[in-house]
Image (cartoon, rainbow, N blue to C red):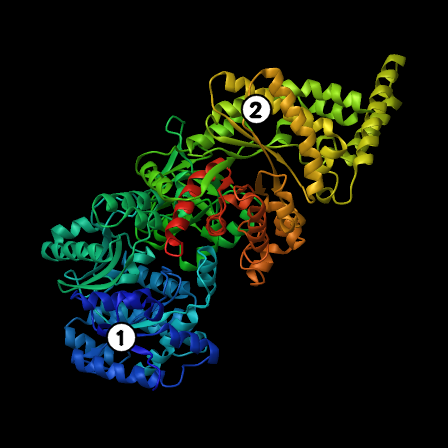
Amino acid sequence: MAKKYVYFFEEGSAKMKDLLGGKGANLCEMKRIGLPVPEGFVITTEACKEFFEKNDFPEGLWEEVLRAMAELERRTGKKFGGEDNPLLVSVRSGAPISMPGMMDTILNLGLNDKTVEGLAKATNNPRFAYDSYRRLIQMFGNVVLGIEHNEFEDVLDKIKKKYNAKQDVDLDVNALKEVVKEFKKVIEKHGKNFPQDPYEQLRMAIRAVFESWNNERAIVYRRINNIPDDMGTAVNIVTMVFGNMGNDSATGVAFTRNPSTGEKELYGEYLVNAQGEDVVAGIRTPKPVSELANEMPEVYDQLKNIAEILEKHYRDMQDIEFTIERRKLYILQTRTGKRTAKAAVKIAVDMVNEGLITKEEAILRVEPRHIDTLLHPSVDPKAEKVVIGKGLNASPGAAVGKIVFDPDRAVELAEKGEDVILVRPETTPDDIHGMAAAKGILTSRGGMTSHAAVVARAMGKPAVVGCEEIKIDLKTGKMFARGKVYKEGDIITIDGTSGEVYDGKVPLIMPEIGGELDILLHWADEIRKLGVRANADTPEQAKKAREFGAEGIGLARTEHMFFGEDRLPIMQEMIMARDEKERRAALNKLLPMQREDFVEFFRVMEGYPVIIRLLDPPLHEFLPSREELRDEIEELKYKLKEAKSPKEIDEIMEKINEKKKILSVVNNLHEFNPMLGFRGCRLGIIYPEIYEMQVRAIIQAAAQVKKEGREIYPEIMIPLVGHVNELRILREKLERVAKEEMEKEGVEIKYMFGTMIEVPRAALTADEIAEVAEFFSFGTNDLTQMTFGFSRDDAEAKFLRKYVEMGILPEDPFKSVDRKGVGKLMKMCIELGRKTRPDLEVGICGEQGGDPNTIEFCHIIGLNYVSCSPYRVPIARLAAAQAAVKHKKEE
């Protein structure tokens, strides 16, 4: 039996998204439930995949399309290519996962020099017919023939000036005939012709939509949103309905709830006498959908009713495209609506309260990056501000950055670490890479459903759109706002919550968790199995982590406590010591400082565990570099030549000798690869007095806090263990210190000794190490580095990004754990460790501990907790709950 490539709308359903794409499956579903959908059919994603294999239509596809077109003619009573009452269709893309604006669409297909006259007669509206024809030539020229959109726009602008027309709708039929003629000349200038055969148009259009799956903007969008490259797109052939037939016709986009705030209201925009592309392209500023209630009340009521039906049917907020043809409403598309982070959280919580979805479903509805966005800054209301423009508040949040007019330039500067605001008259899908790189987006044209607004909301980027008072000249690279001229590199601040644009840098403030987000995260806490701790190096960071819901500290790096102005000289004194006695003398000065650090940590984390990692980095990190010391010595020698008095000479000589002494120690400590050298437990074994001081400080602090009536749970982490004997030697020495301090203080402290698993050998011999260690914590930064043999400091800049782009690696292994390599070591390590010690506590504290994909993996392999930076704690709480929901059935 021949493979079926074409499905009429009544043959499919919402469950067939993989085969029919999101748009096609939902058109089928709406037809099935009796909503007013134009006649049409879908070409499957399977056909697209086979097209790419053969670089041509699969066998039998074109014959199926011809049969389907004949059936459309029968159903509509119109003929494709007919000169009396021609059938026109749209050819639209539709991937299984929504990719708004990334692929291609062609409207009004079937018009030519003869059928346009037939359409004019049939509708008694020549202006409408030629308006539709010029649109087809422009879209076909751009999408199918690859001619720049701007070439057509320049012609249109000239003719508008000639006829004194402010907007496209002001052009009469004669002007539009002239536009058609000039548009054909644009195509001919490129050595091509606009095809007059409607079936040739259709064949070329289907091919172009297939090929748009692999256009640059679609590839970039998939990369940003982690969408697989092998899904392919369906092609939807839909009978045209016309919103550009006059003032009783319109086209628009509506959301069943406000996509910015989440409020339960019909929200959207429409344009009278227009086609759908006019709304999303942002060329004309549309009206809010609420005004439709005055212009066409019966249509508005019908739209509102359909919106409610669709939301209840899909049990999620819907984004609906509609067209009104002579006061008759048609629904052209419904899909799950893109929404801001704030709206996503509010809608999820409200829908649980309305009984539409469960708590588990609400947890899955909010993406972890939504939480990240909610923790983004907002403009400080108390700050002084100079407003230079006000547009539509398309996507909330605030951003400060340098003005950039070109998307490629935005990427270039962002890669150098610059914060940029992408400023454009309007954005197009081709700008996607610049939008992703920018901190925020500002456009002078477009509405709340324009490309810039929809994509910015999906990305969680602050955006102000339709700021018409700001004039942007891309040719000269200038922006004009309230009497001031801005150029690339000038700093502005945009507020996507208020829609205001400010001159210069305005202070921003970080938000706090509350309202619906607090409710959602508490639901997440009820559902998740993984604990969530924080990596924190100061009591202030620990406090912030607790505010965000951390259940303890998974990593406190003690080395960061030694860099303070009052401590670094003592630390250097300890390193410069000639023997153990001098070293201990310096360590005794550091002891009370360390103790105070730990006291504050324990107070903030009362009732929760605190993992303190003993000194890890090589000692040379606390000393100046060799180059710096050599330069300083040379400078002092130069000053010595200029010295005039014996006293001055003596002082300079003393400084030179001191610098030489430090240089000698630095040279002594110098290693070719410090990351694999004298650091971690190796340091503790050779200089045990360092770790002894730290453990003494931990137990003394714990005793002090316990005497205050607080419950505390210190966990002492010994880093970089690769052999059980390293751990055994250190634990025996440090246990003696801990017991000695508890006896002195007269208190019993419940503490644990454990290690960080960051050396592959430790993972492979975890059964032996678990005989001595009571807990493991994966340091995935080093474990990844040593497993791959990649330097985490150099790989990113030199080759890692290219590896991901080329598909050698699916993603950066320093951002998300490499499940097949590093992950396999982790899984083996847990199994071996718990074979020896069934109650072994296991966590992760590397950078990947806040990555949702890594958190899911940690849930699967049975970790007790993940630990991440304070601002990622809410993300981890949600991601851990999502992992629990997704894997509930398996468990």
Examine the rendered structure and indicate whether residue 74 appears above or below residue 397: below
Say which element carries label 1. strand
Three-letter residue code for mark 1: Phe
Residue denoted by label 2:
598
Q: Position of residue 595 (x, y in %)?
A: 60, 21
**Between 866 and 833, which is closer to the camera in this rendering?**
833
Q: Position of residue 497 (x, y in %)?
A: 34, 39
Examine the rendered structure and indicate whether residue 689 appears above or below residue 82: above
Image side of residue 207 versus residue 653, left or right: left
**Between 88 and 623, which is closer to the camera in this rendering?**
623
Q: Are marks 2 and 1 in contact (CB under 8 Å)?
A: no
Of marks 2 and 1, which one's residue comes earlier in the chain?
A: 1
Q: Position of residue 666 (x, y in %)?
A: 79, 33
Three-letter residue code for mark 2: Phe
Q: Position of residue 574 (x, y in %)?
A: 75, 24
Q: CA distance from mark 2 to mark 1?
A: 68 Å
The quarter in which the N terminus is drawn is: bottom left
Residue denoted by label 1:
41
Q: Quadrant of residue 632?
A: top right
The quarter in which the C terminus is drawn is: bottom left
Image side of residue 171 versus residue 388, left or right: left
